[in-house]
Image (cartoon, grey):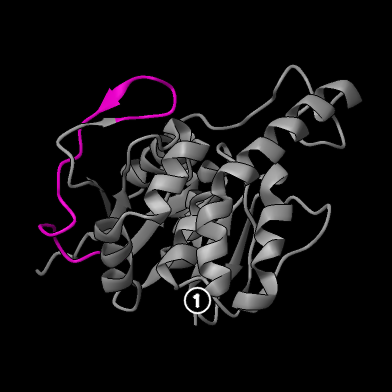
Amino acid sequence: MATEKELIVGIPLYQGCTLVDFAGATQVFARAEGFKVIWLCNDPSVRISEGVTVLPNYSFDYHPDIDILFVPGGGPEGVLAAMENPDLLQFIQNNWATSQWRGSVCTGAFILAAAGVLRNCEATTYWSQIPTLQILAEKLNLEVHDNYYPRFILDEKQCIFTGGGISSALDLALELVIKIKDIPTAEAAQLMIQYQPEPPINAGLPSGAPPEIVAVQMKGGEEYRETLMPAIRKILAGD
């Protein structure tokens, strides 16, 4: 009897990407029946934004066919460099149309924008960078909402997804398992990783965090935006 093909989840890495963005999604897909995760980069090792090093197992030029393209976010310098990395952008462009589902989590949305593939859809990103994404909204025909911080947005017609910040990768991956497979497959993965968050505090969104902490984080968000502006201006000036 023929065995159903595993669906390949391709996660391109880059220097300065964020751990949970790709590790959280990896954990979900790796425990969901019928999926196989691969990490890709042309560098032999990747130093991520948390200061540790991970090893990709494929390059942008050598890899199996990708069924789900999942682009993580990262620190400001890492995302800026990724937005200007021709090998990474070409990889995304090459696999965008051929993958079943494609998208990003967190500030990976800006890398998709730089690759010219995030267009004509509703989109989100890390909460403090929603104003940055709104700068690109008219140019790319994106619908980006003020003061709305969804864990993820799925465009089922175009099979495009974007996720909120960092930990959103887990919820986004579970939703993709539901859409691509079914609820029982997602439930089995959720149980296996015992993902039932009950945080001891409630500061995961600006609405629940103390105002003084929100103010500090917003200041950091403004600095992040300024770091990305050279690449943002290139997108705005493009065709």
Residue at 35% of width from left, 61% of height from top?
69
Residue 56 painted magenta: yes
Residue at 77% of width from left, 19% of height from top?
201
Question: Label 1 amino acid?
Answer: Gly
Q: Secondary structure at mark 1?
A: loop
> Can residue 204 be seen by looking at this rendering?
no
Residue 79 painted magenta: no
163, 183: nearer the viewer:
163
Residue highlighted by disc 1: 238
Residue at 28% of width from left, 24% of height from top?
53
Lateral position of residue 190 relative to residue 120, left or right = left
Q: Residue 61, percent across and down?
A: 13, 59
Lateral position of residue 55 relative to residue 168, left or right = left
224, 120: nearer the viewer:
224
Lateral position of residue 78 relative to residue 143, left or right = left
Residue at 29% of width from left, 55% of height from top?
10
> Can residue 23 be seen by looking at this rendering?
yes
137, 20: nearer the viewer:
137
100, 45: nearer the viewer:
45
Where are the magenta residues, as a range? 47-67
**In which quadrant is the N terminus drawn?**
bottom left
User: Compared to 48, does 153 lie above or below?
Assistant: below
User: Compared to 25, does 132 lie above or below?
Assistant: below
Single out the residue that lies furthest toward the top.
Answer: 200
Task: Give the quadrant of residue 152.
Answer: bottom right
Q: Residue 139, percent across and down?
A: 63, 76
Q: Main secondary structure of the magenta part?
A: loop
Task: Give the quadrant of residue 56.
Answer: top left
